[in-house]
Amino acid sequence: VNTVHLLLLLLIASSGSLVSGGMIDLVCAVEVENVGRISVPEDHTFFLKLTCTTCRSEFPNAVAVSSDMVVEGVRGASVSLQLKCKGCDRQHDITIQPFDAGNEWLPDKDEWQRLATFECRGIDPVDCEVRDGFIVAAPDGTTYDDVDLSDEWMDVDEKGIPVAVNSFKYKFTAHKISKAEKRKKK
């Protein structure tokens, strides 16, 4: 094996996840019946399983992250969560980005739609524990708060029509900057 092949193998082996550091979106795809929108409140708590990007150690438990949580980060900036890796003793942090209208699932859009964006420094989210706290809206405007999407969910709207989330899948992807975000940066 020559040096180039060895370096390529090391790079592939160390990557571990599809997304690494920086801005990461939590996106979802759902199978629904009579659902007009799925979102989370601005102060929603996400439960993330994390891996250190330095030593690839996995944090043993899911960690709660919310935009309501504000602590001082490594360089004095406000972050949502700061943790120390037990494997390499380094400090890492996550900041939930401000919510916008794009943080919701709507029918007739792309299959995978963004629920939240995290800025990750030194850690990668590798899994998410789906729990309660979701907002589901029926096409007639009936809203259901604090819905648990860890399993199938069903209710009826004000007209007696069934409203259901039959499947909720999620994954992490590299954040894609929208045209509006690009204009803000200029």
Image (tube, grey):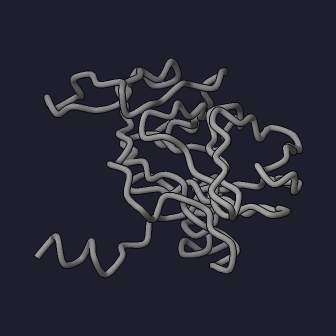
**Which of 131/57 is in front?**
131
**Which of 87/116 is in front?**
116
In percent of the image, x 35 and y 39: which residue is there? 95
Residue 148 location (% of width, % of height): 75, 34
In the picture, measured across the screen, residue 90 lies left or right of residue 34, that is left
**Which of 94/160 is in front?**
160
In the picture, measured across the screen, residue 12 lies left or right of residue 123, that is right
In the picture, measured across the screen, residue 93 lies left or right of residue 171, that is left
Residue 7 location (% of width, % of height): 54, 66
Is 130 placed above or below 102 here?
above
Is 33 placed above or below 90 here?
below
Residue 84 location (% of width, % of height): 41, 20
Residue 104 falls in image quadrant:
bottom right
Assign the C terminus to one quadrant of the image: bottom left
Residue 139 location (% of width, % of height): 69, 64
Q: Residue furthest front?
A: 159
In percent of the image, x 17 and y 71: which residue is there? 184
In percent of the image, x 77 and y 41: which residue is there? 149
